[in-house]
Image: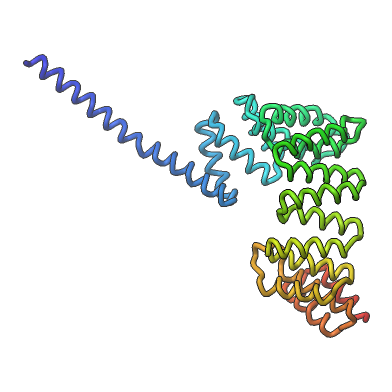
Amino acid sequence: MVVFSAIFNLKSQILNKNILFLLLLFPFFGNTQTAYQQAEEYFKAENFNKAKPIFESLFKKNPSDIKICEYLGDIASYEKDWDTALTYYNNLVKIEETNANYHFKYGGALGMKALSISRLRAVAYIGDIKYHLERAAALDAKHIEVRWALVEFYIQLPGIIGGSEDKAIAYADELGVISKVDGYLAKGYIAEYSGRPKDAERFYKKAIEVGGSPHTYDKLSKLYEKNNQPKEAIATTSESLKKHKRNQLNYQIGKIAAQYNLEPEYGIECLSQYLANYSVKDGVPKDWAYFRLAQIYKNLGKKEIALTWINKALADRYDFDEARKEKSLILAL
């Protein structure tokens, strides 16, 4: 009985010590988890200034944590600190060589780094960019973003150092298998970049037929603007406005009307709607809408009304250089 009692007491002491040990550790694990969750919440809210120091602190304690490493790489990319982003993404590729998204991010960061330096130095990056983007595409047959990157890579790169429209079209074809809309948009982009606006128009119209998203209409409208077809641009944007009811499209119509001295009454109506329904999410500040209204009234020869709107734009933003120049033109009427 004494022996069994001694063993029982010994087990109880060990158990109590283990419980005490775990209780002492619990706050540490709890704080670590809370810190990670807090950093993740900051990141998702795009509050990178607050997320970054927390992630850096956690990374010092656990440099093998690939998720923290990826977050830090993404933050560095947002800050356009390509050298730092490359360090983190390179670590990810080494740890998980078969992860398509890590190759995509590393190849993309290499591409952005190449754009930030001289063309002569950038040539040295081409081989690695190509390898990592193509590796990502090979690893994930449904990775849309990397195929878009490869379309842009091959169409923008001069043929003498590896550019190829045929390869760009091949990746556009792969995009079409995954998403018909992306396939048509990619082929439209290739045609537009290569100076074939009619082909680009055809592909963008097909993208609208298949998908009809605001982005598809925007691509076609911008193509028309680029090729001095403002009537077609307004018609396309108006069609998108009827379908999607996005307030920003009111501004786009007003902008085209002002720039090309086209359909002034419709332009005024759309800009008035834009201002009446304005929110920060619309993207274009109110002062630009005031500026466009001033342009339209200037085009109509209504000097006093034009001055009222341009002064309103300058009252909102005193260093609005375009508005200052426009005011000089209005005063000269």
Which quarter of the rendered picture does the N terminus lie within?
Answer: top left
Whole-percent x, y for residue 311 in the image: 78, 78
Estimate the x, y position of residue 101 in percent, counting from the top left: 65, 33
Residue at the far front: name it.
209
* Residue in front for this viewpoint, 85 or 174: 174
- Quadrant, the C terminus: bottom right
Q: Residue at x 55, y 35 (%)?
A: 67
Q: Is residue 216 left or right of residue 118?
A: left
Point out residue 268 in the picture as x, y percentages from the top left corner: 79, 76
Instruction: Determine the residue positioned at 80% across, 77% down.
Output: 310
Q: Is residue 6 left or right of residue 77?
A: left
Which residue is more in the foreground, 121 or 332? 332
Toward which corner of the image does residue 80 lie, by quadrant?
top right
Measured along the vertical axis of the image, is residue 168 above or below residue 53? above
Residue 9 in picture, x, y percent from top left: 15, 22
Residue 273 image-quadrant placement:
bottom right
User: Up-down: is 253 above or below 161?
Assistant: below
Tell me what residue is drawn at x 27 percent, y 27 percent.
18
